[in-house]
Amino acid sequence: MWLADVVAPGRHLFGPRALPPFVAARRGKRPVRTYAGAGVDRRRTAGALAALLANVRYRPPVASGRPIPLRGHYAGLIRIGRETIAITTDTVGTKSILAEQLDRWEEIGIDAVAVNVNDLASVGARPAGLVDVISCRRADPKVFAQIGRGIDRGLRAARCSLLGGETAIVPELVQGLDVGGTAIGFFPRGRAPVTGARIRPGDVLLGIPSSGLHANGFTLARRVLAGSISGGRTRRRGSRRSIGVELLTSSRIYVAASEALADRPGTTGFANVSGGGVRNLTRLHRNVQFVLDRWPKPAGVFQWLAEAGKISPTELYQTFNMGIGFVVVVRPSSAAEALRHLRVAGYGDAQVVGRVTRGRGVVLPRLGPSYASYA
């Protein structure tokens, strides 16, 4: 099957918005092999965000709640009376462009839930509710029905309620459709937030495999996909599905993993390996080093990305999850028990992927890349 079979005639996979970089390469231009080259400049984004936060100076009275400072973490925490609430927000992003081209939207609905509840799971919060938001140029009932079925599947997996949402018809602002939401979570009685502050050298890193790219790095992945289409085949070797459909696979939800381990004293951290790749681990603790000496080698769609896109290991591991979607940090004496609990919770594929040592940042000794921080 060729991807041209599932793309509307006359429409390029990117639509009219961008020239495929590998096509451009054949016209004498340099191919795009980095996220920045594809249009997502991390440094510029970090600078813009710093400028925004520098100008948000208001601090409400204590009666409005006490924010719990967690610089750069996955969710915001606020103490209201005796309760601690976790809040997070995110969208599926440019994965929706691929969904539009393939006319498959259910995966996007699942992703809209997953990108939010997985961040709640990363602080040990139990999801309570989600409000969705859809920004689009027009509302198509058939597309919305597919998205709704996906949201329903995601909510069931996370045991989370849909509390409401917002649909913004803004043709002057968006060309396609973006789906996301905001989720709220809580900490059952007796549970403290799992922030990573207790992580120390000697702890063990357990990794739970991803289902694919999840909802990150698609600006770069679609560039690679466009180049591969112009080259011919649309399936990677060993796969029965077209690479476009394979890339669209919905995000895995890790709420049950967090629930299984958040109350156990041997658990010291959780990390959703989302945008930023393995650098996400540094969000848990800045004064230790995460040594990923047992992280699996690229396989499947990740191996295809590396080879088809000629992307360097350094760029791969700071853009994609590279096969592991969620990391649990535990005391060494608790590792075997944690793996048993994960197996019971439905994550029998969890495995040891590394360890914590003295130092700073993240290193992958067998594969080469190292990162000093998340930024």
Image (spheres, helix red, strand yellow):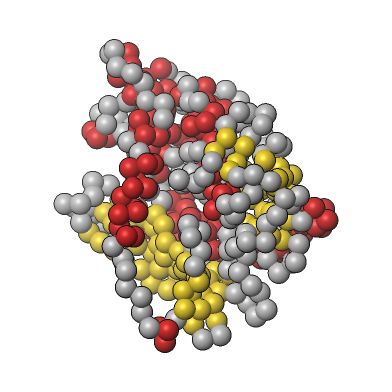
Quarter of the figure with the C terminus: top left
Residue 198 percent coordinates (x, y): 67, 61
Residue 189 image-quadrant placement: bottom right
194 and 247: which is toward the camera: 194
153 and 59: which is toward the camera: 59
How many numbered badges does the structure rendering display?
0
Residue 250 percent coordinates (x, y): 51, 48
Can residue 199 be seen from the camera position used here? yes
Residue 139 percent coordinates (x, y): 26, 57
Can residue 152 be seen from the camera position used here? no
- Please determine whether, in this image, residue 365 is positioned above or below residue 335: above
Residue 20 percent coordinates (x, y): 32, 25
| Residue shown at 57% from the left, 52% from the top | 286
| Residue shown at 73% from the left, 56% from the top | 330
| Residue shown at 47% from the left, 49% from the top | 107
- Please determine whether, in this image, residue 315 is positioned above or below residue 332: above
**The furthest residue to the left:** 172
| Residue shown at 35% from the left, 30% from the top | 37
Task: Give the left or right position of residue 186, taking residue 245 as reference.
Answer: right
- Please determine whether, in this image, residue 187 is positioned above or below residue 334: below
373 and 206: which is toward the camera: 373
